[in-house]
Every structure is written in C-alpha cells, then in structure tokens.
C-alpha cells in the first residue's frame, strides 16, 4: 500500500461517503442500508444517507466511489515479538504489510519466538509486561497490536496472575506451548487468569515448535480456555471426530486460522454453523510461523471459507470483524455508533469473474484494497499486496 504521510492525529471530523456496499461486521445484519459514515475524534458518530446527515465542516472527506466499506479486519492469532520485526522469519515490516491486507487490529497468542525466551516465572512476567507496554505505544502503520501474552510455565501461582493483571496484561499465550501441558494443571491456571480478567487461548492439535506438544480434545475441554486456538491445527489438526467434539461439547470461541488444515477449518466452520452458533467463529493467521508471513492471510481465509464452504461472504467477513471484536471485548470490528473508526475500503479485483465484490469473494478471489483507515485516520492508500481494485476510493480533503 502506498504510504500515506498526511494527517496522523485522530482528532477532527471524517466523512466517508459514496459507499456502494457497507458491511457491518454483525451477523444479525451483515449489510447496512447506508452510503455515509461520519467519524468524530476517531469514533463513529453517525451512519446513514449522505443527504440526511450533517456532513458540513469536515476535516477530511473520503469518497468510496461506489465501492465496499467494511470494518477493519482483526487477526485473532499472531505471534509478535519486538516492534515490526519477526525473528521466526527474520523479516522486518511484517505488521505494516498486514495493514496492506486490511488488518487493523492484531491479538497476540504469545511472544513465543523471542530468541532466548525466558521460562522462569520472573522472566516470563517481565517479558509479557514489556510486550504489553511496548505495543500499547508503538503501532506499526497504525495497527493496534494487543500484546503481552505470557506462556504458562510450571510453578506459576495465583498471585502471579494478579500481578500480571495489575500491570495491564490481559491475555495468556497459547496454553501448551510452555511447560504446562496437562488439562488439570492448565485448568487451574486458566481459572486464575479468568478471575483477574485475563483471557486465555489454548493450542489445539499437534506440536508446532520444539517444546510444544500434542493438545487433544480431552485436554482442551478440561483446560476450558476462552478460545480454542487454531481448532484446525497449528498446523497439524486433530481428527475430525475430535473437532466435532470440541464444537459440540463447549461454548468457547472456535478459532480458524490460515496456517492450519483447510479441510479441518471448513469442517469446524460448518459444524459450528450447524449448531446455530456462528457467533463463536473467529479468524486468525497463526503467523509469523514456519510457513512464513502472510499479509493477505485473513483475506485468503475469508475467500476460502466462503467459496469452498458455500457461506455468504458478508457472513464470513463477520467472522473476521464483529465476531472477533465481541469475543475479545474490543471496541472495533463493527460499523455502529460508538465504535472506533477502523475501515477497509475495497472492490472486486480487476478482471475477476465475479460481477461484484461479494460475487468475486464467493468465487474464491481476493478483493483489491484501495484504502485503510484506523481511528478515523487514512493510514494508507492503494494496496501493494492485493490485486488492483476495479475502482479506487479517493481522498477529497
């Protein structure tokens, strides 16, 4: 995406007009009947028809030129370390590159790739607090990275979780990547974390890195973490009968990731929808990882689940926006008054067989992104990673 060096302060009034398709991120009403959004000081203040809204005295005006506006995408499962660098692939600028794929918010599942990652209790707490502090201030490309997710190690006690929570830590790294691998031991620590407002994710499936282990359905169910992390494997999936067991036997979030087993991901989605519990589905990339950095991972996952799973694309977009926001208790991911103004503006890719953006995604094509807005600020323009959009949004003021 072309770097945008203009206004970076969220203060002021933004008008996004000329919207041809407005995706809400809400499963109850995935498409909204509106062509204009007004954002004031980074927060959505009004939604409706241009002729009926107060669009005067705008500091910035974006014309979507008849294309699609959706909530900024949320990657529910990333492994950041320090700034915009990943030691797993020795690559810099990976977060900014995900911004090119429409991702405006990321959730850490553990800063596990840090060389020499401390496994003693004092060290792991210090590392989590450092990551939380660092990413709360440093936002590569404007992307909001919710980091500071300690990996559970044996010997942790209740006071450790209270200390972490008091210091601002709100996440646990993937249960099972550290020394705590049994369901019973994990259950106690997950309960302590939950008591102090720390949300937990559990590794599901075969080992992904040296030191991790198989975490099967019995362990997942006993540990009772808030999010069934990469239910389709990270990258090796559990057998289909165990995936069905997890979908049916608990009400925790079902996370499907790009870097997992695609067959298992489709099965998990279909099973959860059959249970009439689509609100449990969340999407992530599980990256950076051994398979690399995937800037378009969330878009590719949306296209795959829609086209191969025969689910309406506007519904699948909800999995990567409003569903994740509600599961993670974030004030983004939905186009509604009071939510932060995070948007991705896109259109069908040039020469796609689909007549519209939704048609093209339902056929498995990726959309072309022309603009990403975070907190009411245009962070970047035409994507350098997606195929070119048929029609581009424009900045009028």
Image: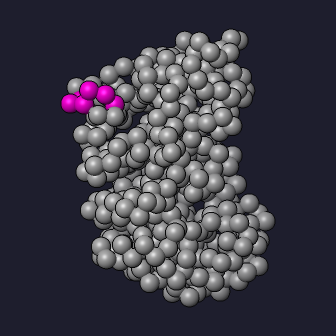
Secondary structure mostly seen in magenta is: loop
**Vertical placement of residue 312 versus 279, above or below:** above
Please tell me which residue is depicted at 69% across the width and 62% down the height of the picture.
169
Image x and y of residue 162, in percent? 76, 73
Dividing the image into 4 quarters, which one contains the C terminus?
Answer: top right
Q: How is the image coloured?
A: one colour
Task: From the top left corner, tell me how far across and down residue 270 is, in percent.
Answer: 33, 60
Residue at 56% x, 43% y: name it: 333
- Measured as percent of width and height from the top left, residue 286 is found at 43, 59
Quarter assignment of residue 116: bottom right
- Tell me if I can see residue 60 in this picture: no
Q: Is residue 334 above or below residue 83?
A: above
Relative to 269, does residue 215 appear above or below in the rendering?
below
Residue placed at 71% from the left, 66% from the top?
197
The residue sitting at 58% across, 87% down in the picture is: 185
The part of the chain drawn in magenta is 352-357
- Report whether residue 243 is seen: yes
Q: Nearer the viewer, residue 319 or 6?
A: 319
Q: Is residue 318 left or right of residue 123?
A: left
Relative horizontal placement of residue 329, taking residue 272 as reference (left or right): right
Quarter of the rendering occupied by the N terminus: top left
**Is 354 contained in the magenta span?**
yes
Give the quadrant of residue 166.
bottom right
């Amino acid at each position: 995406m072309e770097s945008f060096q203009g206004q970076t302060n969220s203060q002021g009034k933004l008008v996004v007009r000329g919207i041809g398709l407005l995706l809400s991120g809400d499963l109850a009403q995935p498409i909204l009947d509106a062509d204009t959004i007004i954002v004031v000081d980074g927060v959505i203040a009004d939604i409706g028809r241009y002729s009926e809204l107060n669009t005067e005295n705008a500091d910035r005006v974006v014309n979507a030129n008849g294309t699609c506006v959706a909530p900024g995408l949320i990657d529910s499962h990333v492994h950041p370390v320090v700034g915009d660098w990943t030691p797993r692939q020795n690559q810099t600028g990976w977060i900014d590159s995900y911004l090119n794929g429409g991702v405006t918010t990321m959730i850490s599942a553990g800063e596990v790739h840090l060389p020499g990652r401390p496994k003693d209790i004092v060290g792991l707490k210090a590392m989590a607090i450092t990551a939380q502090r660092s990413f709360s201030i440093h936002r590569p490309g404007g992307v909001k990275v919710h980091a500071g997710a300690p990996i559970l190690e044996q010997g942790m006690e209740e006071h450790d979780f209270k200390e972490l929570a008091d210091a601002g830590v709100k996440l646990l790294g993937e249960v099972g990547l550290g020394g705590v691998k049994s369901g019973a031991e994990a259950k106690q620590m997950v309960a302590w974390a939950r008591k102090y407002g720390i949300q937990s994710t559990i590794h599901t499936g075969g080992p992904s890195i040296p030191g991790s282990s198989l975490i099967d359905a019995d362990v997942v169910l006993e540990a009772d973490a808030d999010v069934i992390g990469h239910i389709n494997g990270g990258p090796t999936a559990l057998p289909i009968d165990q995936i069905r067991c997890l979908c049916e036997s608990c009400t925790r979030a079902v996370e499907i990731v790009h870097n997992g087993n695609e067959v298992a991901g489709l099965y998990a989605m279909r099973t959860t929808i059959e249970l009439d519990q689509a609100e449990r589905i969340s999407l992530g990339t599980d990256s950076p990882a051994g398979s690399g950095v995937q800037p378009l991972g969330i878009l590719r996952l949306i296209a795959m689940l829609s086209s191969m799973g025969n689910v309406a694309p506007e519904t699948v977009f909800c999995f990567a926006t409003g569903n994740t926001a509600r599961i993670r208790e974030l004030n983004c991911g939905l186009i509604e008054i009071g939510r932060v103004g995070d948007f991705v503006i896109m259109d069908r890719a040039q020469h796609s067989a689909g007549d519209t953006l939704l048609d093209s995604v339902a056929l498995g094509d990726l959309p072309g992104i022309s603009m990403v807005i975070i907190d009411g600020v245009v962070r970047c323009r035409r994507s350098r990673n997606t195929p070119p959009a048929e029609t581009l949004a424009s900045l009028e003021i």
